[in-house]
Image (cartoon, helix red, strand yellow):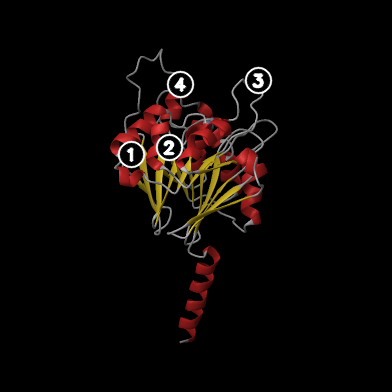
Amino acid sequence: MKHLITLFLLITASLHAADGKLIITYLNMPEHGLAVVVQTPSGKTWMIDTGHQSDKYDAGRDTIEPFLKARGITQLDGIAISHPHGDHYGGALWLLDHMPVKTFVDTGYAARGFSLAYNRVRQHAQERGAQYIAATEGDKLDFDPALIVEVLSPPKAMHNTDTDPAKISEHGLLNTNSLFLRMQHGQNVIFFPGDAYGTGQRYVLEKTSAERLKAAVVTAPHHGFNTHSEFAAATKPKFAIASCLDFYAGSEVPSPGEKLTKQFEPLGTQVFVTAWHGNIEITSDGVDVTAKTERKGK
Ligand SMILES: [Zn+2]
């Protein structure tokens, strides 16, 4: 009996820690990138992308690890990298070197545009003991028993490789072949499309039923720079979130936040932008979804 009571207390303690809720935090960073912390209902922690790394900033060292430590998180159940661009995998090496990471996921591509630097990260994950999973369309990722995490795109064979190579840049090719995830927690659906351009978004729209496209939360594709109006209309989320800067020095392009707001607000969607709101925390109890931000915004 005593054992049973201890067991019961242990179970309630661990349930209480995660509270049965899904908590997703979009981290605000001083350099352009995307890094999302997913705390699952049973208390596991995954990263979807890991921000940027430069000579003065490392998202792993300067943003992600301090955030995890403040929440008492000392290991990662997984890191999923949407595509091999520095603003998405920049913090991964630091995390792999400074905490146990159980799983490392990417698309498994080794073709055009895959830099040596990224291949080193993928290899390093395995050297550090992470189980490596190459995931493409139709695969499911085991984040937590309470979540269904499906890969909707890219297909096993890359999008657009048959297009005239002169017309599609390596950069665009890798963006559009981002890991495009659909996460379901009870009635709530959250999309993580990485930097998928039109081809990636159209592919998902064509292959997914209207019912399965309806979302509670959409991570704005390509930081909000390239969110197609059809994708916005089909998902019609309660919240749309962009991880981007407010000002892109040397570029005439305004913050994608402005564009995103114009695009989503007529749908009744509330828009959050990391540069304006700071860290953006989404909580799902499986029925409702709520948002909490560090700052009030613009
Ligand atoms: Zn990006």
Between disc 2 and disc 1, the foreground one is: 2
Nearest the eye: 92 or 233 = 233
What residue do we see at 42% from left, 18% from top? 168
Q: Secondary structure at mark 1?
A: loop
Structural crowding at the residue carrying mark 3, measured as other residues with C-alpha within 10 Å and reported as few (<14), some (14–19) or many (≥20)? few
Amino acid type, mark 4: Glu
Quarter of the image containing the N terminus? bottom left
Badge 4 or badge 2: first in the primary sequence: 4
User: Disc 2 or 3, which lies upstream in sequence?
Assistant: 2
Disc 4/disc 2 C-alpha distance (Å): 26 Å
Taking depth in this image into account, of 229 and 155 the one nearest to the observer is 229
Image vertical order of residue 6 relative to residue 33, above or below: below
Q: CA distance from mark 2 to mark 3?
A: 29 Å
Residue found at the very far top of the displayed protein: 166
Whichever of labels 3 and 4 marks the residue nearer the N terminus, that label is 4
Q: Which mark is residue 137?
A: 1
What distance separates the C-alpha of mark 4 from that of mark 1? 21 Å
The answer to whether mark 4 is within 8 Å of ligand 1 is: no
Residue under circle 3?
A: 250
Amino acid identity at mark 1: Glu
Q: Is residue 56 left or right of residue 235?
A: right
Residue found at the very far front of the displayed protein: 266
Would residue 162 be seen by someone viewing this image from the given angle? yes
Is 67 located above or below residue 175 in the figure? below
Which residue is the site of mark 4? 170
Q: Quadrant of the C terminus?
A: top right
Residue 174 spot, x, y in % from top left: 44, 27
The 10 Å Cα crowd at callout 4, few under 14, some 14 to 19, many 20 or more, is: some
Distance Cα–Cα, label 3 vs label 1: 37 Å
Going from N to C along the chain, the mark reached first, 2 or 1, is 1
Where does label 2 land, which residue?
A: 232
